[in-house]
Image: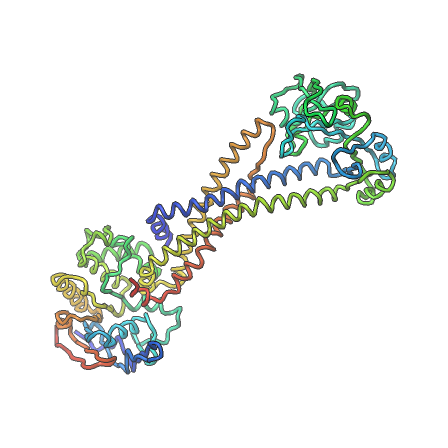
Amino acid sequence: MFDLIIKNITQRKLRTGLTVFGIALGIFAVIVMGGMSEHFNITFDRSMSLTADKIRVMPEGGFVGVSLNESKVREVKRVPGVSDAYGLLQSPLDPESLGMFGGDTVIGIPPEKQELAMKYTKLTDGRFLVAGDGYRAVLGSSVAREFNLKVGDELEVKSKRVQRTTSITHTRNFTIVGILEYTGSFFDNAVQVPLDRAQKFYDRGDTVSIILAVPDLNADPEDLTKRIELNVEKVKALSPSDLRKQIEQSLIVFSLITISAAVLAAIIGGLSVMNTMLMSVSERTKEFGLMKALGAETRDILFMTMGEAALMGILGGILGIIGGGALVYYLNDYLASRGTTLFTITPRLIAIAIVFATLLGVLSGMYPAYRAAKMSPMEALRYE
Amino acid sequence: MSDGEIILRVRNLTKTYMQGKIPVHALNDVSFDVDKGEFLSIVGPSGSGKSTLLSMVGLLDKPTSGSVFIDGAEITKAKDNEAPIIRREKIGFVFQHFNLIPTLTAQENVDIAMRFARVQKSKRKERAVELLTQMGLRDRMNHKPSELSGGEQQRVAIARSMANHPAIILADEPTGEVDTKTRDMIVELLKELAGKGQTIIVVTHDTAVSARTQRIITMRDGGIASDTKVGEG
């Protein structure tokens, strides 16, 4: 029966081609949009696993503008149940272009805490920061690739010390002492420098952007988070699960937007399959009547017509995956040279795309197939 | 040619259509028997009920009342899902417009009937070649209907109708669309098949066709007006 299906869809090459192309476009969108969503999910998961055990302490009132005095680090450390705490200072690497998708950041970190903060992460070259380091930096893998830097090279960092000015006020070269392996997290886009140097360079006095608190092994992070908020004034603490929830929520919104756009595109492809199949079924009314007279059962007709629709769906799906995969490959390649990636095509995504394409074909073939199968053979034979 | 074995038994067959609110009696209490190997024609003016009768016997439509037995089994009692099986095992159709599938070659058109009957692929090929050879189309097997003449197309259709060794071949105006020379050839072919024991019922307007069958049933106003044996054809 399969050869008949192929015969039928190759009989009308242009029509089949257009329909397949319609599905392919939809699946292309699923792959590209889905690839973006997958990438964000994976980055989030990896970033979380690097910082999941720590409680984030931020200035009350939000992230931007306000900063914490370093004295708060000591206060946090004194809260019972906190085994360690350290402050980080974060600033964009290039203050003049704030990329929409992250972009590179400079992280000032107490040198002796760096290895602890980057648990599990190895260096591909060089060493971690050590106490007493001056203008030294450890680069994330993406930053290193973007600027094509090796251990021993110098990286120019710019700053705008006064918030109001729009031009760069200071630049300073940092010597690279280490390069981190690829983590898939935001640390890939980070330039880690000693905290005291960062504070001096950015003219931020004794302030930090965020304090990370490491709970004791037997302390409950949720309880500890509340205790930090109670014991330290004017801070907001975020437990790992709070953070996860917060980010997951925004990721869900992002996924919903991308996926619904993709699904919409794919449904339009599905409608074109339905349209093609309805046309082809009504063109072949007489043929189906004849097949029934020849003894074709309802399931034979259903199999043939739905098979045609499903095959168009699968073909479109494969083309869409190839097309989307190619675009994503070249875009990632291009973006990698600029220090970022935006898409990850996972096996899961490919499986979803192909199942979706097939399902789309089958579902849109259902009604036309039903019409074909329900035809009375006598009426169909009389149909001119 | 008949050996007395009854292959088709029609009993009190009645079909009433509703045309709006007016009932139309297309068939009215029709009964007759057909022996195995008989070559029979059903004639009559348009609207006399001959095509309706053919579609009841061919299980393409259901009667209002009455029964049709083929090989002793009452096909009018068949359920909807059994009808296709009976059609492909017991009945072969030949139509006025040939009704070949335009995208398939002659051989594939014969093949498809056996495909629905779930015949093995190798056996299907063997049978299709055998039948088309018998129809004198051995060198036309890989041609599509558009590349065949009317007579050739109808011979493909006849080959197709015989593919599953049906009990009866039902031919609805099989010569309605061909010239007289081709008509004679087709009638001769059907007659030859009947001579080999194949039961054939032909519905026709053409007296030149019916005259060459063994038995003529004349229909009028949904009933049988006359049923005459022409003698040994």
* Residue at position x 22%, y 71% in the image: B201
Can residue A122 be seen here? The reply is: no
Percent position of residue A47, x then y: 68, 36
* Residue at position x 71%, y 45% in the image: A245
Marker count (numbered): 0
Image: A122 above or below B167: above
Tell me if B208 is positioned left or right of A184 in this view.
left
Percent position of residue A8, x then y: 34, 51
* Residue at position x 29%, y 73% in the image: B57
| Quadrant showing the C terminus of chain A | bottom left
Can residue A289 be seen here? The reply is: yes
Coloring scheme used: rainbow
Q: Nearer the viewer, residue A170 or A143?
A: A170
Image: A271 above or below A142: below
| Residue B15 occupies quadrant | bottom left
Tell me if A241 is positioned left or right of B17 in this view.
right
Tell me if B65 is positioned left or right of A201 in this view.
left
Image: A119 above or below A359: above
| Residue A146 occupies quadrant | top right
Q: Nearer the viewer, residue B152 or B233?
A: B152
| Quadrant showing the N terminus of chain A | bottom left
Q: Nearer the viewer, residue A66 or A32?
A: A66
Percent position of residue B171, x then y: 23, 68
Image: A269 above or below A342: below
Tell me if B150 is positioned left or right of A218 in this view.
left
Percent position of residue A175, x then y: 70, 18
* Residue at position x 21%, y 79% in the image: B220
